[in-house]
């Protein structure tokens, strides 16, 4: 079994920054993809950024240039640095993990609230 534990959400003003962390434990594959998705009320779930165990990254257009995903393979931890935050970034953010991108929703963290408001 795999466990994902997130931290780092909160309230921030527009233009501010937050950093989310996700630590994975349990039976982690040698090759995997980890990422962050978000769900806002009344909106579809969106996969905003993901990283492979080989270090390749990718981003949704909505966050490209503002969010940076990084990972530490030895700690099985992934980070999401969120800069220039906008009110529309407000959502519950979830850490996700799977063998590959197609299976990235196999495992979920508990979610952390990010609120961008003045």
Image (cartoon, helix red, strand yellow):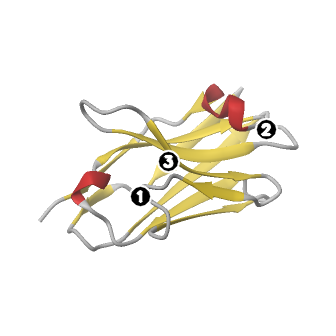
- The quarter holding residue 9 reads bottom left
Location of the C terminus (image quadrant): bottom left
Looking at this view, is 18 or 2 the one in front?
Answer: 18
Instruction: State the mark number for residue 28.
Output: 2
- Residue at (31, 54) in percent of width and height: 89
For the residue carrying disc 1, how many other residues have a C-alpha within 10 Å: few (<14), some (14-19), or many (20+)? some
Disc 2 + disc 1, Cβ < 8 Å: no
- Residue at (16, 60) in percent of width and height: 117
Instruction: State the mark number for residue 57.
Output: none
- The quarter holding residue 66 reads bottom left
Q: Which residue is mark 1?
A: 8
Above/below status of 37 relative to 70: above
Q: Earlier in the sequence, mark 2 or mark 1?
A: 1
Q: CA distance from mark 3 to mark 1?
A: 7 Å
- Residue at (83, 37) in percent of width and height: 29
Instruction: State the mark number for residue 6.
Output: 3
Disc 3 + disc 1, Cβ < 8 Å: yes
Above/below status of 51 relative to 99: below
Q: CA distance from mark 2 to mark 3?
A: 16 Å
């Amino acid at each position: 079994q795999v466990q994902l534990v997130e931290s780092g959400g909160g309230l921030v003003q527009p233009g501010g920054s937050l950093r989310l962390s996700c630590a994975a434990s349990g039976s982690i594959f040698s090759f995997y993809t980890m990422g962050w998705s978000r769900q806002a009320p009344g909106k579809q779930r969106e996969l905003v950024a993901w990283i492979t165990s080989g270090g390749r990254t990718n981003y949704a257009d909505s966050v490209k240039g503002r969010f940076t995903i990084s990972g530490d393979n030895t700690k099985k931890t992934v980070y999401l640095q969120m800069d220039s935050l906008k009110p529309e970034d407000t959502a519950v953010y979830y850490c996700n993990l799977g063998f590959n991108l197609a299976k990235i929703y196999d495992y979920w963290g508990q979610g952390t609230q990010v609120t961008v408001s003045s």
